[in-house]
């Protein structure tokens, strides 16, 4: 231990001669010298209330362990309590910062509530640094804009703040190093040949009193609380019995009042619901809820078509009855504005006054959805040929053209997909399900709804509602019609993401890739390959990421109807072209 002390003190003496220049408010100047820096020394610190009366807080402040403070400070245990103004020696590592040519120990402090550079420098670090030097070494921080949690560097001058006699030093050496004019709170450099032996006060821990008088007080208090508690419980029981009888009497009266209000609210609810759809009463038939229950066998599973749509027979005619858990007023207002052969026709509606559910009664479209014909193999339905697929595509395009061009304000469907395209007995397509439709476009919404794989990028990213989002979804439907693939595969990849590659390269390569990409059911028949290619080009145009580059439905209908009629036979030998007259 003595060898180590002598080594440390010799380093300190060398350093003190090097720092003989007069100090200023920002610190002590130095020149980087590997033979001197870094060095080990100690600072004198005094325990103080309220935060720094234990070694744990002081060791955290200086980023050292408690044992590193107890040994030089002559303290017996790291857990020993401290008394105010108790002297401590705390080890620090000194260095010369080449950016500022200042010699200090680099300590990091986390700003707490109400902390300032001045407060932490003078109180916490007890003038071992100055707020001016803190500002200097933290150029990116503004002293008046400190926030809780900021990490701040506090430069600690490696000093012993006391007099020569206390530390066993020569007074003349103090004058030589620090000068004759030493003011209060100045930093004083003290050269020593060994660590001073600090005499620590004896701290006596308080011992709990065991006097008989205190025991008597505790026993008396316990008895008093016990008696008071018993009386309180007795009072609660008496009052509870009285309130019990009063409660049941009021409860019976309130129950009768609730039943009366329920019957009244039930009647008002039915009136309000009917008032919401009053504009539709002259256009659609209003069915009784009991009629719908009888038509669907009580909405049984055997009558369920899909989701919440049931097949029901009313007056010898079949209808599709859609049960909705919300007010269908908006959907009714949109449906009463449209009337087109390629849109599923609404026949009427009903409102259940008990639960407020709304039931929409549509025409029954017997051949089901396009999705089931393209993607479900139940052994009953045969695959669609190309002529039928193209006619379905044109029907859907005509329906969208109608709602986009001939409604005011413009209606946006918002949920075009193969499961919402129904096929009648002649395999003609009708657009169904206007539950998400929006009357009016160029709006922005935060409530993004729709089906994955069909949602336009601008709607998904920014919530922009325009007719071009229906055009995008129609492009996905065309891809399904051509390829027989679903909009989203089992890995969650969208069908439209890589379709552009099909028509890249040389002409012969395009046809070969198209044959490999399209539905196998089409490859096996004599098919208009040029027509398939033209329809795929329309789909790609509809799927442009930039909405302004997508065509409107008027252009789509025209292009689909003008598709060429060149029949190409797929065979093992390649492609043979046989021109035929236009339809």
Image (cartoon, rainbow, N blue to C red):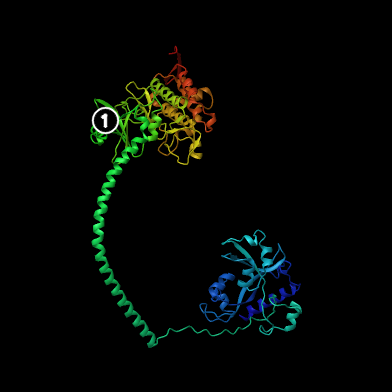
When asked about the image quadrant of residue 163, the answer is: bottom right
Say which residue label 1 marks.
312
Q: Position of residue 42 (x, y in %)?
A: 64, 75
Q: Position of residue 408 (x, y in %)?
A: 46, 28
Residue extending farthest to the bottom is 212
Q: Nearer the viewer, residue 200 or 394?
A: 394
Above or below, 458 against 48 in this view is above
Q: Position of residue 222 (x, y in %)?
A: 33, 79
SS at mark 1?
A: strand
Visible residue check, residue 328: no
Q: Residue at x 45, y 40 (%)?
A: 448
Visible residue check, residue 314: yes
Q: In the picture provided, is 386 more to the left or to the right than 161? A: left
Q: Residue at x 62, y 63 (%)?
A: 152
| Callout 1 crowding tier (Cα within 10 Å): few <14, some 14–19, many ≥20 | many
Above or below, 365 against 147 in this view is above
């Amino acid at each position: 231990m003595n060898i180590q002390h002598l080594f440390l003190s010799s380093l300190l003496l060398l350093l003190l001669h090097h720092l003989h220049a007069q100090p200023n408010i920002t610190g002590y100047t130095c020149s980087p010298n590997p033979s001197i820096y870094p060095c080990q020394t100690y600072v004198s610190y005094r325990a103080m209330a309220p935060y720094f009366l234990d070694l744990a807080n002081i060791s955290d402040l200086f980023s050292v362990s408690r044992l590193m403070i107890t040994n030089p400070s002559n303290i017996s245990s790291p857990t020993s309590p401290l008394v105010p103004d108790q002297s401590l020696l705390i080890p620090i590592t000194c260095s010369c910062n080449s950016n500022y040519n200042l010699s200090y120990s680099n300590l990091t402090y986390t700003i707490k509530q109400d902390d300032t550079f001045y407060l932490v420098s003078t109180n916490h670090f007890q003038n071992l640094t100055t707020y001016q030097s803190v500002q200097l070494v933290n150029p990116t921080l503004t002293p008046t804009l400190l926030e809780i949690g900021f990490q701040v560097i506090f430069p600690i001058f490696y000093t012993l703040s006391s007099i020569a006699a206390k530390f066993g030093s020569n007074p003349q050496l103090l004058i030589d190093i620090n000068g004759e004019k030493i003011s209060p709170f100045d930093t004083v450099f003290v050269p020593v040949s060994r660590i001073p032996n600090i005499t620590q006060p004896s701290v006596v821990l308080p011992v709990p009193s065991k006097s008989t008088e205190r025991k008597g007080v505790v026993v008396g208090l316990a008895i008093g609380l016990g008696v008071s508690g018993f009386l309180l419980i007795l009072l609660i029981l008496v009052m509870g019995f009285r309130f019990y009888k009063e409660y049941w009497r009021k409860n019976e009266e309130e129950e009768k009042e609730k039943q009366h209000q329920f019957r009244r609210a039930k009647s008002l609810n039915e009136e309000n619901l009917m008032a919401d759809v009053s504009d539709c009463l002259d256009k659609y038939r209003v069915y009784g809820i009991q009629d719908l229950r009888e038509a669907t066998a009580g909405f049984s599973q055997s009558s369920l078509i899909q989701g919440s749509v049931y097949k029901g027979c009313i007056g010898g005619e079949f209808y599709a009855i859609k049960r909705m858990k919300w007010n269908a007023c908006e959907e009714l207002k949109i449906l009463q504005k449209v009337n087109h052969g390629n849109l599923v026709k609404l026949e009427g509606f009903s409102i259940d006054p008990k639960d407020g559910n709304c039931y929409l009664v549509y025409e029954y479209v017997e051949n089901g959805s396009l999705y089931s014909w393209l993607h479900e193999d139940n052994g009953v339905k045969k695959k669609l040929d190309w002529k039928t697929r193209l006619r379905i595509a044109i029907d859907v395009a005509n329906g969208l053209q109608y709602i986009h061009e001939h409604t005011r304000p413009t209606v946006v469907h918002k949920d075009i997909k193969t499961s919402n395209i129904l096929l009648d007995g002649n395999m003609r397509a009708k657009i169904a399900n206007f539950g998400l439709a929006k009357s009016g476009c160029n709006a922005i919404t935060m409530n993004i709804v729709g089906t994955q794989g069909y949602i336009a990028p601008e709607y998904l990213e920014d919530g922009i509602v325009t007719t071009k989002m229906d055009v995008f979804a129609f492009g996905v439907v065309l891809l399904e019609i051509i390829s027989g693939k679903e909009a989203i595969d089992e890995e969650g990849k969208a069908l439209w993401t890589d379709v552009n590659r099909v028509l890249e390269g040389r002409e012969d390569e395009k046809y070969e890739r198209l044959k490999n990409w399209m539905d196998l059911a089409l490859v096996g028949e004599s098919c208009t390959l040029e027509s398939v290619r033209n329809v795929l080009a329309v789909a790609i145009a509809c799927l442009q990421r930039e909405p302004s580059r997508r065509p409107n439905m008027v252009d789509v209908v025209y292009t689909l109807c003008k598709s060429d009629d060149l029949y190409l036979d797929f065979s093992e030998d390649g492609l043979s072209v046989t021109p035929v007259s236009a339809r």
